[in-house]
Structure formats: structure tokens, C-alpha cells
């Protein structure tokens, strides 16, 4: 069936919605029924439940151990220029797009592609990534529990070299963290905190191929983490929304306490100066802008489908645009705030050891599990500060797990609505499968496998998913239609700024981010050691396990799922199904009337420009007299 011209919509109503229906009418009926089932899902009890849940989702461990290091390495305070610019031009538009689409359609990350069903593979890819990523991320979240356990004593175990796990290369502080001459050459000195983390907490093996046995304290900590995740998720968002009032706010209390204590320490302001001193010459280097784009891109978690899921539980008339502006800004400001907390203590550490701040700074998990614990050990009442720091780290990490598991649950119960009433059992199965399926990460070689999966599994897929979303909702379905849907849903005008970002700026920058990742992606390594080639091959297999879902479903849809000529099959794949649109019948009926009364000259034009050109009157929005 040929789609009627856009300027005939006022006469033909929602005919464009039903263009190119599938040959089997029952299939569209089933899709419509599934959409109606989505309207039965729980809603957040209040807007603050949703806001805190999304804040907890976006603020993760990377805000603590990645951003401060990236900031000082790329110009200090000057780095905030490209960072905040990318926040406005990339993170905010993607955040709003995913949140608005999820709320409008009340759909999962797979269901939103009923607007362009041939791209459902992008939603499947996001689900695979979430499944793989949650397994290793919960292990990182569990590590702080082990540090808390070891901190409940008078003397911290990583402050001496007299323990069973220490070697002859152990040194008490990083002051001696230089090459130590021996008769056989040179041997790097290892700090006691480094040996505690690797030899006691991880019981690390010599390489990725030497799996060894399970590290039972790690197994117990991860199991405890999964129990908390299960209890927070199994009853739905109404319970989850209450849990996050603790888990999302507690880290800010702890960070504030740590900052107040940190800035009162000698040398703290040297560390802060080292963190924020602007080096504007760095802005001439393209890699600094690329680092800012990548950092802000992955801080906001676009492309994983979790933002879509969280917003799908909003009421249809919620103020999604306001939230989409608040949360990314809070996330960015939190990253900057954490930098002050980290570098105030690192400045104190450098002062105590008689060295410079750059000698005691590192990125990644080493900052959180080696350097910062060592710095805290130099403070009075060190065990107390360690407990507070690792409690904060645990809560920061587990919030993100809540959102990802909720996304997986929403996908399963949306695709198989007959098991929706068995949500508790489904939650238990998902948590159990992920926990048991990642046994190798709890082994003595676990940190290598964790690094390998983290290195490959998500980066490319998340970026490709964002490109698919932009391709669908900006070009195929059309940015004009997307904005019209938002305006109908919110009763507010979407500015031309969002129109420009969705149509031009954000797609271009996202493509640039993806190209930069491809050109600069190197092999996985841990602690300065490159993992072997066979391990890199396994890493690429995990990456392609999700990436191939996008072209794979595209081929499946055209070859198996549809009938007719190639042109007819493609038309069906690029046209909205009957399931697309608001899930609630009242809102759907109003949306259909709204589309009929607000036709577009073209799907790529802003609806306001179409209305002005056609001199059409405004219609009374739903819920307004």
C-alpha cells in the first residue's frame, strides 16, 4: 500500500500509520495487543522516584575512577570546555530522545522499533550487551564489600608488608614506587596496597589462561550483591523507586563528608590545583576533544536501552523534557565534584610522601582499589574513612545494576506478556543466570576476563545503537513526526535547538565518535600487560555477539518475516506497525486526531514550520478544557 502524501493527512487521518501493513493482519493485531499490554505496566509513584532512579543509573563507578583522571590528563579545567560542549550537543539530545520515545510508546528498547521494525535488531543488541555487561559490572560493585570487611579492624591490612600475601618487592608507601636496582637487572617495587588488592582480594593468577580456582570471598560478595538487586527489582518500579531514595542520595552524603575532610588535610589544595589548573594549549589537540566526547557519551549510558525502559514507566503526560535536562547536568556536575574529592586526598598523599601529585595518580580500578585506599590509610581514623568511601562506591555502582536488570525484565515481559504475572520468578531466573554464567570472573583469572569483556562488549554496540536510533527517529520515521509526537505528549513546543541537534549536529558527532573509536581502538590489556591474541579473539566474539544482531535481524525480517517483492518487504520494514504509538487507548485516540489535524509538509521539517505554512489552527490538547 502506498503511503498518502503528508499534505493529505488532514483528510486521510492516520492512514500513514497503517501504510504497508504486514500481509498477515493477525500479526498487526497481535502487535497492537502487545502495545495495549504495555499500558498495564507499573508507573513510578512520583516523578522523583524516576529522577533518582535515572540519576543512580547514569552515575556509576566510571564517574569516580575515570573522569578525574581523564580531566587532569587532558588540560584540567580547560577540559571542561569540550566536556560541557559535548554534554549539550551529544548527551542531552540523545538522553531526551531515548527518554521521550520510551515515555511516548511505553515500550522496551526492542518495542520502540515498532516505528521502524526492520531495526528491531538494535534493541536486541542492546539487550545482549546489558546481559553481558551486568555480569562483570556486579563483580566490580562487589569488590568494595571485601574492602569494607577488611576495614573493620584497628590496622588496615594494606598498610604493611608483613602479611602472607606480600612478596619481597613490597614497599609500605608509593614513595619508593621507582625502579629498584637488583643484581639481575631491574625489578619494579610494588606498594603494599597493590599487593593486597591483587594477591589477597583477587588472588590473581599469572595470566588469563591460568584460571585457577574460584575466589570464594569474591563469590560471596557477588552473591550478596545479586540478592540486593533481586530484592530491589522483583516487585517492580514502585519498590525500586523507594530503594533509590537511599542508594542514589547516600553517595552524595558520603562524598560531601569526604570532601570536607579532604580539603582540611595538608597538601589538599595542591591536589585540587593539579586537578583544575587549565592548560588551554591542550584544546588544540584533537584527542582531547575525542576524550571529552567519549567520556560524556558513555557517562549518560545512551544506546543501552535502559533510559528508554526507565522512562517507559512514566505516566504519558510526565515532564520528560525537564527531566532530560536535569539528569545529564547532575551527572556531569557529579563527575566534576568527585574530582575534587579524589584530588584533595591525592594532594594530601603526595604531601605526606614528599612527591608530586602526578606520581600518585592513576586511572581505572587502580585508582579506587589501590591508590585511594592507600591515601586514606595515611589519615587519622583511617578505617572509618575507608568504610565510608567503599560504602559510597558500593551504592554508586549498585544503582546502575538496578536499572539494567529492570531493562532486561521489561524486555522479557514485553516480548512474552503471558509471564508478566510471574515477575518475581522471572527476576530470580535472570539474576541467577547472570550470576552463574559469569563464574570465570570469580576465579583467580577473573580480573583478566573482566577486563577483556569490558574492553570489547559494549563500546561499539552502544554507539551503533545510538546511530540506529538517530537514523530511525530523525530520518526514516522523521524528526518532524518525532517532535510532533513529543509536542502532543507534553503539550509544549519543542524548540528548534532540539530539532537541529537531532537532525544534524548529534548524528554527525556520533558518527565522529564511532570513527574515532574504530581508528584508535587497541588490544585489551591489564596492568600494563597486553592480553594474548587468543583472548583478544574471544573479546571480539563477545563484541560481535551483540553487533551482528543489527544486520542479522535486518536480513531475517526481509527474508523470512515478510512477504511480497523486495520493495514491498522493505516498505513494511521501514513503516510503523500498528503497535507504534501511545499504549493507552485514550492517548492513542488523541494522538491519531492530533496527527490528522497537524499534517507535515515533510517528515524532516519541524511541525511548527508546517503549521505556519498551512495556516492550521491549534487543537485543544488532551486534558485541557
Image (cartoon, grey):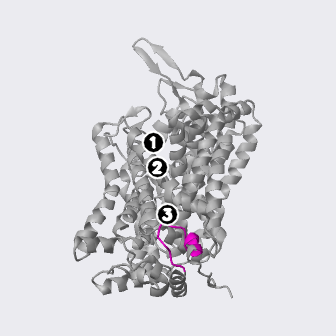
Residue 472 spot, x, y in % from top left: 42, 65
Q: Which residue is mark 3?
A: 306
The residue most toward the top is 183
Q: Cα distance, mark 2 to mark 1?
A: 8 Å
| Depicted 408 relative to depicted 351: above or below | below
For marks 1 and 3, the one nearer the N-term is 1
Residue that badge 2 annotates: 218
Q: Residue at x 54, y 66 (%)?
A: 99
In the image, which disc is placed on residue 332? none
- Kindly state the secondary structure of the residue where label 1 is placed: loop
Q: Which percent across, then down, holds residue 385?
A: 68, 43
Q: Nearer the viewer, mark 3 or mark 2?
A: 3
Q: Residues within 10 Å of mark 3 (few under 14, many from 20)?
A: many
Q: Is residue 204 above or below residue 405?
A: above
Cα gap from disc 3 to disc 2, whole angstroms: 27 Å
Give the crowd class for mark 2: few <14, some 14-19, many >=20 residues within 10 Å. many
How packed mark 1 is, by other alpha carbons closer than 10 Å (few <14, some 14-19, many 20 or more), is many
Residue in view at x 59 percent, y 49 percent = 393
The residue tagged with tag 2: helix, strand or loop? helix
Q: Which residue is mark 1?
A: 202
- Asked if residue 605 lies in the magenta stretch, the reply is yes
Q: Give the alpha-carbon distance from disc 1 to disc 3, as whole Å.
A: 30 Å
Query: Can residue 173 be spotted in the picture?
Result: no
Tell me whether the residue at label 2 lies in contact with that at label 1, contact meaning CB atoms closer than 8 angstroms: yes
Which residues lie in the magenta part?
A: 598-612
Question: Based on the displayed image, in which of its 4 quarters is residue 120 positioned?
Answer: bottom left
Outermost residue toward the right in this view:
264
Amino acid at each position: 500500500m502506498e503511503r498518502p502524501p503528508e499534505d493529505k493527512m488532514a483528510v486521510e487521518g492516520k492512514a500513514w500509520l497503517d501504510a504497508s501493513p504486514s500481509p498477515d493482519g493477525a500479526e498487526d493485531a497481535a502487535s497492537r495487543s502487545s502495545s495495549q499490554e504495555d499500558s498495564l505496566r507499573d508507573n513510578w509513584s512520583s516523578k522523583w522516584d524516576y529522577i533518582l532512579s535515572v540519576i543512580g543509573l547514569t552515575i556509576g563507578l566510571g564517574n569516580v575512577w575515570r573522569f578525574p583522571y581523564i580531566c587532569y590528563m587532558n588540560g584540567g579545567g580547560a577540559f571542561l570546555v569540550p566536556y560541557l560542549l559535548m554534554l549539550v550537543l551529544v548527551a542531552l539530545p540523545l538522553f531526551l530522545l531515548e527518554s521521550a520515545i520510551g515515555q511516548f510508546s511505553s515500550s522496551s528498547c526492542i518495542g520502540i522499533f515498532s516505528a521502524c521494525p526492520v531495526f528491531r535488531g538494535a534493541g536486541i543488541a542492546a539487550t545482549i550487551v546489558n546481559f553481558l555487561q551486568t555480569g562483570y559490572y556486579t563483580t566490580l560493585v562487589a569488590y568494595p564489600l571485601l574492602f569494607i570487611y577488611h576495614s573493620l579492624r584497628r590496622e588496615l591490612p594494606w598498610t604493611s608488608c608483613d602479611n602472607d600475601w606480600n612478596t619481597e618487592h613490597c614497599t609500605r608507601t608509593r614513595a619508593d614506587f621507582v625502579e629498584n636496582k637488583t643484581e639481575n637487572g631491574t625489578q619494579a617495587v610494588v606498594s603494599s596496597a597493590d599487593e593486597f588488592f591483587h594477591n589477597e582480594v583477587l588472588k590473581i593468577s599469572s595470566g588469563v589462561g591460568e584460571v585457577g580456582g574460584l575466589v570464594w570471598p569474591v563469590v560471596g560478595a557477588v552473591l550478596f550483591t545479586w540478592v540486593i538487586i533481586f530484592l530491589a527489582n522483583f516487585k517492580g518500579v514502585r519498590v525500586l523507586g523507594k530503594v533509590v531514595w537511599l542508594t542514589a542520595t547516600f553517595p552524595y552524603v558520603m562524598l560531601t563528608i569526604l570532601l570536607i575532610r579532604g580539603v582540611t588535610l595538608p597538601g589538599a589544595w595542591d591536589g585540587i590545583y593539579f586537578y583544575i589548573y587549565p592548560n588551554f594549549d591542550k584544546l588544540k589537540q584533537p584527542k582531547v576533544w575525542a576524550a571529552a566526547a567519549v567520556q560524556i557519551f558513555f557517562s549518560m549510558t545512551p544506546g543501552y536501552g535502559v533510559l528508554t525502559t526507565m522512562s517507559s514507566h512514566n505516566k504519558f503526560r510526565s515532564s520528560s523534557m525537564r527531566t532530560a535536562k536535569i539528569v545529564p547536568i547532575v551527572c556531569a556536575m557529579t563527575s566534576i565534584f568527585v574530582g575534587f574529592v579524589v584530588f584533595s586526598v591525592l594532594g594530601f598523599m603526595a604531601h605526606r610522601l614528599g612527591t608530586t601529585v602526578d606520581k600518585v595518580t592513576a586511572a581505572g580500578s587502580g585508582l579506587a582499589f589501590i591508590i585511594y585506599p592507600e591515601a586514606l590509610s595515611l589519615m587519622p581514623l583511617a578505617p572509618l574513612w575507608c568504610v565510608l568511601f567503599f560504602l559510597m562506591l558500593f551504592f554508586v555502582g549498585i544503582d546502575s545494576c538496578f536499572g539494567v536488570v529492570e531493562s532486561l525484565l521489561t524486555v522479557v515481559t514485553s516480548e512474552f506478556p503471558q509471564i508478566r504475572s510471574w515477575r518475581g520468578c522471572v527476576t530470580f531466573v535472570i539474576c541467577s543466570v547472570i550470576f552463574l554464567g559469569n563464574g570465570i570472573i570469580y576465579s583467580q583469572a577473573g580480573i583478566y576476563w573482566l577486563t577483556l569483556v569490558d574492553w570489547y562488549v559494549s563500546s561499539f554496540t552502544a554507539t551503533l545503537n545510538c546511530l540506529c536510533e538517530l537514523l530511525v527517529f530523525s530520518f526514516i520515521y522523521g524528526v518532524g513526526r518525532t517532535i510532533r509526537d513529543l509536542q502532543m505528549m507534553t503539550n509544549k513546543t519543542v524548540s528548534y535547538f532540539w530539532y537541529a541537534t537531532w537532525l544534524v549536529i548529534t548524528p554527525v558527532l556520533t558518527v565522529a565518535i564511532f570513527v574515532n573509536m574504530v581508528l584508535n581502538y587497541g588490544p585489551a590489556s591489564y596492568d600494563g600487560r597486553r592480553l594474548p591474541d587468543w583472548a583478544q579473539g574471544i573479546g571480539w566474539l563477545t563484541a560481535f555477539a551483540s553487533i551482528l544482531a543489527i544486520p542479522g535481524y535486518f536480513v531475517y525480517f526481509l527474508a523470512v518475516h515478510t512477504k511480497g517483492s523486495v520493495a514491498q518487504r522493505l516498505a513494511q520494514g521501514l513503516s510503523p506497525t500498528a503497535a507504534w504509538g501511545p499504549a493507552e487507548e485514550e492517548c492513542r485516540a488523541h494522538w491519531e486526531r492530533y496527527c490528522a489535524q497537524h499534517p507535515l509538509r515533510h517528515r524532516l521539517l519541524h511541525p511548527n514550520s508546517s503549521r505556519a505554512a498551512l495556516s492550521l489552527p491549534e487543537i485543544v490538547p488532551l486534558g485541557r478544557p
